[in-house]
Image: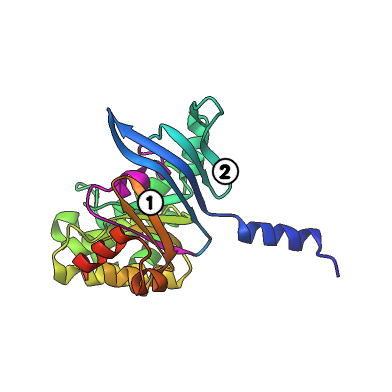
């Protein structure tokens, strides 16, 4: 029996990449940081982006939500072009209003929390939904309390960030990103600034998000997380994405010599 229009539309939506990056080039001055990087992330997929420090992982992540601009290439978020390059090599972005709208589909968690120190935990969560999305205060508070329950910090709602541990601050940062109801979560080394004993509580929160089928792109040095939670591992070195494979295959038998050397050092 032929598919109905709705069925075809649903199938197309299911196959539509959440993130599509093709041929990304980026330089700082004369120093090439990203060299022809291409990566596709599907709906509900968890991709671990790994590699040595300085390999361009964080820069690539920042390019996906316009914290950095690219010199050349193509970026689309949920099928909507953010940046594209013409035949003459000129890279152009959509209008500023469209950039803001498209980038709201992504939430980002940084290494160093970036919480507002003068606001309580609850106020950190409700600020952006109220200011950016125009959400009513009561609705924003109700949403924030649900998210604080999710990350296990409801009891800290009235505390200021200075009274939280590093792990608690990072979980608040995750909740704050989720408060904007993104479809995609980007994590830039979310545990690198934490003491080892605090890393586990943040990774547990991220595992729970993965189980809820949140689309996630995670720059990380936590190989246990990459092996156990990620569907796909993408390995970068010296600005190039050298290998993208299912996590089990990557850790079982990495295909590139640089990947093998990296794993031998990390495991």
**In which quarter of the view is residue 217 placed?**
bottom left
State the residue at coordinates (22%, 59%).
169
The residue carrying pointer 2 sits among few (fewer than 14), some (14 to 19) or many (20 or more) residues within 10 Å by Cα, namely some
The colour scheme used to paint the residues is rainbow
The reply to whether residue 152 is in sight is no
Left or right of 169: which side holds 139? right
Q: Residue 1, percent across and down?
A: 86, 70
Residue 137 coordinates in the image, percent (x, y): 41, 51
Check disc 1: other Cα within 10 Å, few if <14, some if 14-19, many if 20+.
Answer: many
Give the secondary structure at mark 2. strand
Residue at image point 31% right, 36% down: 32
Residue 169 is left or right of residue 19, and the answer is: left
Q: Where residue 28 sits: x, y (%)?
A: 28, 32
Q: Nearer the viewer, residue 78 or 41?
A: 41
Residue 196 in view in this figure: yes
Q: Quadrant of the C terminus?
A: bottom left
In percent of the image, x 50 and y 29: which residue is there?
A: 92
Seen from the viewer's position, the closer of residues 195 and 173 is: 195
State the SS at label 1: strand
Front: mark 1 or 2: 1
The residue lying at 17 percent from left, 61 percent from top is 194
What's drawn in magenta, residue-wise?
A: 45-68
Say which residue label 2 marks: 80
> Does the segment drawn in magenta span residue 47?
yes
On the image, numbered disc 1 is attached to which residue?
241
- CA distance separating discs 1 and 2: 23 Å
């Amino acid at each position: 029996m032929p598919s109905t229009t709705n069925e075809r539309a649903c199938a197309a939506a299911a196959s539509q990449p959440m993130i599509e990056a093709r041929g990304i080039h980026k330089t700082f001055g004369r120093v090439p940081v990203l060299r022809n990087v291409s990566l596709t992330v599907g709906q509900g997929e968890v991709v671990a982006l790994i590699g040595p420090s300085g390999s361009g992982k964080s820069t690539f992540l920042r390019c996906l939500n316009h914290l950095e601009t690219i010199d050349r290439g193509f970026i689309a978020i949920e099928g909507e072009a953010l940046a594209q390059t013409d035949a003459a090599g000129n890279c152009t972005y959509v209008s500023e209003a469209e950039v803001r709208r498209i980038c709201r589909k992504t939430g980002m968690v940084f290494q160093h929390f970036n919480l507002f120190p003068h606001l309580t935990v609850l106020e950190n969560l409700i600020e952006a939904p109220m200011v950016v999305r125009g959400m009513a205060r009561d609705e924003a508070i109700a949403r924030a309390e649900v998210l604080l329950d999710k990350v296990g910090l409801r009891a800290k709602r009235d505390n200021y960030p200075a009274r939280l541990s590093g792990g608690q601050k990072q979980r608040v940062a995750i909740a704050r990103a989720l408060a904007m109801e993104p479809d995609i979560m980007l994590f830039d080394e979310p545990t690198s600034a934490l003491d080892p004993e605090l890393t586990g509580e943040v990774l547990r929160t991220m595992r729970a998000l993965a189980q809820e089928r949140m689309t996630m792109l995670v720059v990380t040095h936590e190989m246990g997380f990459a092996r156990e939670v990620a569907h796909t591992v993408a390995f970068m070195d010296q600005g190039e994405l050298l290998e993208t494979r299912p996590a089990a295959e990557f850790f079982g038998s990495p295909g590139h010599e640089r990947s093998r050397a990296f794993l031998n050092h990390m495991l």
